[in-house]
Image: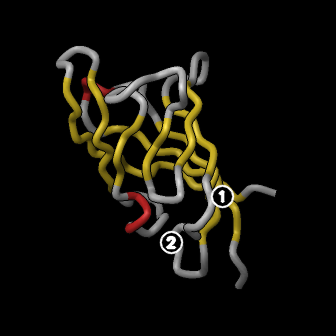
Amino acid sequence: MANRVVRVVAEPDHADWEGYNLVLDLMIDDENTIVMGRPYFGAQGAISSPEPLVFTTSGTLDFGSEYEEPERTAETNLKAKAITFGEKFTVKQYNNQTYKKESVLYTIKKIEPMK
C-alpha cells in the first residue's frame, strides 16, 4: 500500500480546552505514522472561526507571524504516534488565562481519506 493523505480531527480531553479541536491534513504511511520531511496544513478551534496553523517538519504547530512567542508555537508528540482512531497525544500550548504553556491531551476522533 502507498502513502495516503488523510484529514485528522482530534478533540481535547480537558473541559477548559473544549472547542479547541485540531484538524490536520497529513500524509501517513502503511504503518499509520506521519510521513515527515514536509510541512502540513491544519486549523484549531471552532469551525466558525478556526485558527490556521502549519504542522512543521520538526513536529511543532506554528500559528503564524500574527503571533509572537509564546503564543505562536505549540509542541506536540503527534509525529511519534500512530494515526489511528482513539490514539492520544499531547499538545503543549499557551493558555491566555494562565499566561503559561500547558500540556493538553487530545484524542483522535476522526480520520477521513482525502481524494
Q: Which residue is mark 1?
A: 6
Tags 1 and 2 touching, CB below 8 Å: no
Q: Is residue 82 above or below residue 42?
A: below
Q: Is residue 71 left or right of residue 66?
A: left
| Residue 12 position within the rendered picture, expressed as x and y whole percent measured from the top left | 34, 38
| Residue 36 position within the rendered picture, expressed as x and y whole percent measured from the top left | 55, 67
| Residue 69 position within the rendered picture, expressed as x and y whole percent measured from the top left | 35, 29
Q: Is residue 70 left or right of residue 58?
A: left
Local packing at callout 2 (Cα closer than 10 Å; few below 14, some 14-19, many 20+) is some
Task: Assign a secondary structure to mark 1.
Answer: strand
Q: Residue at x 38, y 68 (%)?
A: 80
Within the image, what quadrant is residue 82 found in? bottom left
Q: Is residue 87 left or right of residue 35?
A: left
Q: How many marks?
A: 2
**Please, what is the three-letter code of the amino acid marked with disc 1?**
Val
Q: Earlier in the sequence, mark 1 or mark 2?
A: 1
Within the image, what quadrant is residue 100 found in? top left
Quadrant in which the C terminus appears:
bottom right
For the residue pair 25 and 73, the one nearer the viewer reads as: 73
For the residue pair 94 and 49, the one nearer the viewer reads as: 94
**Please, what is the three-letter code of the amino acid marked with disc 2?**
Thr
Q: Which residue is mark 2?
A: 33
Task: Assign a secondary structure to mark 2.
Answer: loop
Q: Is residue 58 above or below residue 100?
A: below
In the rendered image, the residue lying farthest to the bottom is 1
Q: Residue at x 27, y 45 (%)?
A: 105
